[in-house]
Image: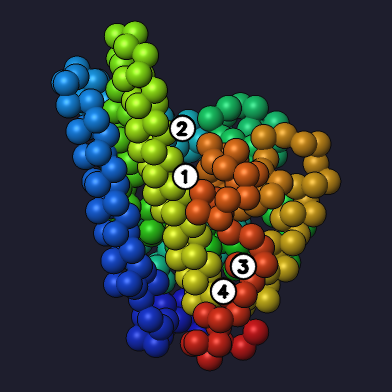
Amino acid sequence: MHAEDMNKEFRMNSPALITWQQKAISAGHLAAACGTALGAVAFVAGSPYVVTAAAALVGLDWYTRSKRDNDAFKRLEGIVQSGALDVASQQRLTGIVDEYSQRALLKQPVRIVSMSASDKEMLPEFRESLLETYPSRLIVIDKDFANTLSDPQLRAGLAHEIVHVADDAATTKVIADKITKFGIYVAVGGVITTALSLNIPATAIATLFFGAITLSNVAIQASLARHGEYVADRGSVLLARDPGAAISGLSELKKFAESKKPTKTDLDTPLSSNPRFSFFNKLGVALLRPHLTDAARSRFMFKVAKQYNIDS
Ligand SMILES: [Zn+2]
């Protein structure tokens, strides 16, 4: 079937990749983030400087992140065009990514770059993960890892990443993330100013509040991340229609990660895109885990396949 016909058929016969329930969950995160951020502000109500500084930090975070992503994207384009990266090995990947980004109705094109360890040395901002999505519509895959995957495994994995791009653009999710960070900064600033005042009992209470606010904010961020993985796994099943390949691809990922020298790669959940949370992943506290276990993902994907009558 012609690619354009396939896309049309997909849009007519498939449910939305991001459902209204998923949007409602993002909105719930937003509400929870607002609640804890308000708690943090109330806690330091006497220190308008702390609140102002926290707001400035979030603004700076927002600005530098998008600037860094854009700069890296431009440099990467330059390197690809200069021929330093193996463009031929990417053709297999580009076809799949183009097809799925069209079906996912992404407004901006998604670029995929397959990199070797030495390519990564030229672009240190790309982390050591084997397969990772960057917010600015960029997917980076380890070249050697891509070569170990069968076509169906590659399709399922890339479909998952494409849905991350679609989901990460969701306004409620972006705002919930920024408000959560704001709450954490206010709480940190609050405990520092209280500690500086050297009033011991007040410091103890402040630390307690700080702990509660920070923990609930970390829980919101972890929950946002888990939610994103469910959305991406569901989308992978709908786009690639092959949950078996998605699951065997996950075990290939684990095998490949373990065969490499231990690096910053998160061996527990190598598909993860957020190493900031690896500490909480290791703690094993379900509510604070940003990622899902392979077993949970496998159960979930087979359930989705059954729901939509997809052979698995
Ligand atoms: Zn993911």
Which residue corresponds to mark 1?
Answer: 134
Q: What is the three-letter code of the residue carrying label 2?
A: Ala
Secondary structure beneath label 2: helix
The x, y position of residue 76, in whole percent, is 51, 35
- Mark 4 or mark 2, earlier in chain: 2
- Mark 3 or mark 2, earlier in chain: 2
Which quadrant would residue 73 be assigned to in this image?
A: top left
Q: What is the three-letter code of the residue carrying label 1?
A: Tyr
Marks 1 and 4, how far apart at CA: 24 Å
Marks 4 and 3, how far apart at CA: 6 Å
- Mark 1 or mark 3, earlier in chain: 1
The residue at the point 60 percent across, 62 percent down is 157
- Mark 1 or mark 2, earlier in chain: 2
Which quadrant would residue 248 be assigned to in this image?
A: bottom right
Which residue corresponds to mark 3?
Answer: 296
Secondary structure beneath label 1: strand
Residue 237 visible to an observer of this rendering = yes
Q: What is the three-letter code of the residue carrying label 4?
A: Phe
Mark linked to residue 300: 4
Secondary structure beneath label 3: helix
Where is the C terminus found, in terms of image quarters?
A: bottom right
